Image (tube, helix red, strand yellow):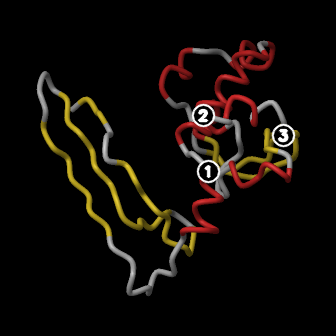
Amino acid sequence: MLSPIAVCFVKRELYTTTVKRLGKRLVTLERDRLVWWLSWFDTDDNATDEYWYGVYDNTANVTQQYYDTHRIYRWYCRMKWLQRNSMYTFNRRVFGLRPDSKLAWQYKADIPLFFGYYNSINIGWKSHKSISTLLYAGRIVGLRKA
């Protein structure tokens, strides 16, 4: 609920990462990150503007010039990223488990629905690239097109 407001508080800083929009090259760019006091909303492994640079959904059809010159669109992309990865850092720090924890479990399933759709379920604790902590996953409804 707070993502639309939180993304108004970003700072630009140099960030080195692999950028899908640039052909999956490792580059250093000025990228948007949430200010330190909102960092618990953000993702550890990507900048706040990853929805744009990671080419999610319809962003592939939008030019870099449009993105750079339209504040509302940049706000929208940052907000979509936080909605997609809600309270990621908070989740890791508060609910995360060590990989060898006896409490760790995970249930994943893809349940076919109708008209070429399925429901993707992922609950429990999941491993995630380059993060040594298991993250809590609570997706019960994940409507996907087959």
Q: Position of residue 121 (x, y in %)?
A: 28, 49
Horizontal side of residue 68 vs 94, given as left or right? right
Q: Which mark is residue 30?
A: 3
User: What residue sits right under mark 1 in the picture?
Assistant: 87
Among the two numbered marks 2 and 1 on one chain, the one whose residue lies closer to the N terminus: 2
Among the two numbered marks 1 and 3 on one chain, the one whose residue lies closer to the N terminus: 3
Q: Are marks 1 and 3 in contact (CB under 8 Å)?
A: no
| Residue drawn 54% across the image and 15% down it | 61
In this rendering, which labeled residue sits more in front, label 2 or label 1? 1
Residue 59: image quadrant is top right
Q: CA distance from mark 1 to mark 3?
A: 23 Å
Q: Position of residue 78 (x, y in %)?
A: 68, 32
Among the two numbered marks 2 and 3 on one chain, the one whose residue lies closer to the N terminus: 3
**Viewer-proximal residue among 94 and 129:** 94
User: What residue sits right under mark 2 in the picture?
Assistant: 51
Q: Quadrant of the N terminus?
A: top right
**Viewer-proximal residue among 60 and 145:** 145
Q: Position of residue 22 (x, y in %)?
A: 64, 35
Residue 64: image quadrant is top right
Identify the secondary structure beneath mark 1. Answer: loop
Task: Classify 10 as above or below 89.
Answer: above
Q: Are marks 2 and 3 in contact (CB under 8 Å)?
A: no
Identify the secondary structure beneath mark 2. Answer: helix
**Amino acid type, mark 1:** Met
**Amino acid type, mark 3:** Glu
Horizontal side of residue 97 vs 64, given as left or right? left
| Residue drawn 51% across the image and 63% down it | 129
**Viewer-proximal residue among 62 and 87:** 87
Residue 53: image quadrant is top right
